[in-house]
Image: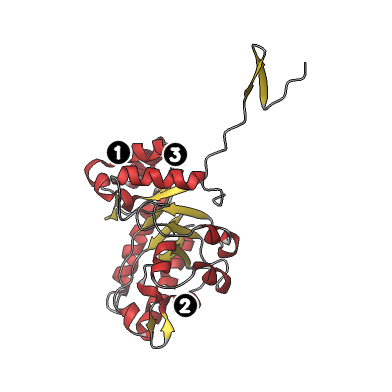
């Protein structure tokens, strides 16, 4: 008898053995469960890993530690739960000339901690008011980010910037986000595009993919609440992922219809089941 891989004969009948689709590689920004991380970081990481997330992005770096754990210890905790510690949100404001050396020394310590933890991406998720009120201040931020990116490159880490909706406003007749894309070195600064915030800012993600191909290596996949429960139309965005340069997608939930843990699980289930997510 010839045996077919997708079916077996049992007691005169046929039982389908169609293989289960492999899980997609999807990360979680731990800001989504920030209160849980404060009260029980270990237990929260265990729950996130059990859900099926592939990696995490931290939002808890300070003084050389992650969520008050040594870099190697936090890395070990994440990996013990079947995930990778892939990315991290942190940063410093624009230093003036008297604080430049001090700020760069802060970055040296920060980068060293992230390298010990095995992190691939460091992302700054904010700018000070200088970046929003004049092109001169914004250009200073771009130069600053280029310098930080150069430091990260030397350690084998990629540096990037994460947007909110304010970057899609104009200053002196120019859209802030466009100016940043045009005045940062692609070899030193990538962009983590928040799909919800660009939409809230009145812009279209696909337009940016076409105008600046390859610049958006990480995406934050976010909706009004749980991913898939709000107004976001993700399908056309994902259909243009190759143009954007996207390498990884990361869930972030900031408003909840359920507990944060339930919300991030529902978000993962939506993306795992969405045909347009490859």
Taking depth in this image into account, of 143 and 132 the one nearest to the observer is: 132
Where, quadrant-wise, is the N terminus in this rendering? top right
Q: Earlier in the sequence, mark 2 or mark 3?
A: 3
Q: Position of residue 82 (x, y in %)?
A: 44, 37
As measured in the structure, the alpha-carbon distance from the residue carrying label 2 to the one carrying label 1 is 40 Å
**Cα–Cα gap, marks 3 and 1:** 16 Å
Which numbered dot is residue 42? 1
Residue in front for this viewpoint, 44 or 258: 258
Q: Quick one: label 3, few (<14), some, or many (20+) residues within 10 Å?
A: many
Q: How many marks?
A: 3
Disc 1 element? helix
Above or below, comparing residue 118 to residue 189 in the picture = above
In the image, what residue occupies the spot 29% across and 69% down?
A: 102
Residue lying at the far top in this picture: please name it.
Answer: 11
- Look at discs 2 and 1 and give the one toward the viewer: 2
> Please, what secondary structure does the residue beneath circle 2 have?
helix
Query: Regarding mark 3 in the picture, which secondary structure is present there?
Result: loop
Percent x, y for residue 167? 38, 74
Compared to residue 87, the image places residue 82 above or below, namely above
Considering every residue shown, the one lying at the far front of the view is 13
* Marking on residue 178: 2
Determine the residue positioned at 38% across, 76% down: 141
Q: Circle 3 sits on which residue?
A: 52
Location of residue 86 with respect to 77 vertically, above or below: below
Which of these two is toward me, 13 or 187?
A: 13
Q: Is 95 positioned to the left or the right of 17 in the image?
A: left
Residue 185: percent from left, percent from top: 51, 73
């Amino acid at each position: 008898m010839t045996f077919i891989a997708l079916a077996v004969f049992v007691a005169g009948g046929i039982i389908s053995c169609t293989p289960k689709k492999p899980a997609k590689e999807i990360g979680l920004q731990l800001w989504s469960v920030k209160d849980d991380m404060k009260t029980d970081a270990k237990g929260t990481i265990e729950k996130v890993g059990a859900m099926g997330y592939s990696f995490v992005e931290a939002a808890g770096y300070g003084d050389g530690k992650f969520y008050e754990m040594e870099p190697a210890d936090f890395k070990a905790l994440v990996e013990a739960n079947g995930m990778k510690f892939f990315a991290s949100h942190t940063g410093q404001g624009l230093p003036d000339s008297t604080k430049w050396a001090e700020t760069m020394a802060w970055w040296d310590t920060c980068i060293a901690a992230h390298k010990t933890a095995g992190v691939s991406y460091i992302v700054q998720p904010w700018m000070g008011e200088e970046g929003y009120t004049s092109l001169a201040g914004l250009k200073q931020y771009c130069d600053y980010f280029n310098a930080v990116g150069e430091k990260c490159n030397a350690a084998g880490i990629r540096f990037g910037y994460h947007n909110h909706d304010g970057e899609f406003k104009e200053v002196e007749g120019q859209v802030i986000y466009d100016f940043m894309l045009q005045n940062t070195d692609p070899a030193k600064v990538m962009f983590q595009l928040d799909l919800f915030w660009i939409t809230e800012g009145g812009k279209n993600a696909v337009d940016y993919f076409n105008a600046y191909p390859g610049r958006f290596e990480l995406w934050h996949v976010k909706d009004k609440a749980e991913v898939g429960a709000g107004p976001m139309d993700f399908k056309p965005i994902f259909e243009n992922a190759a143009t954007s340069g996207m390498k990884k997608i990361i869930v972030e939930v900031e408003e909840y219809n359920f507990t944060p843990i339930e919300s991030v699980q529902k978000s993962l289930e939506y993306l795992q089941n969405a045909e347009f997510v490859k």
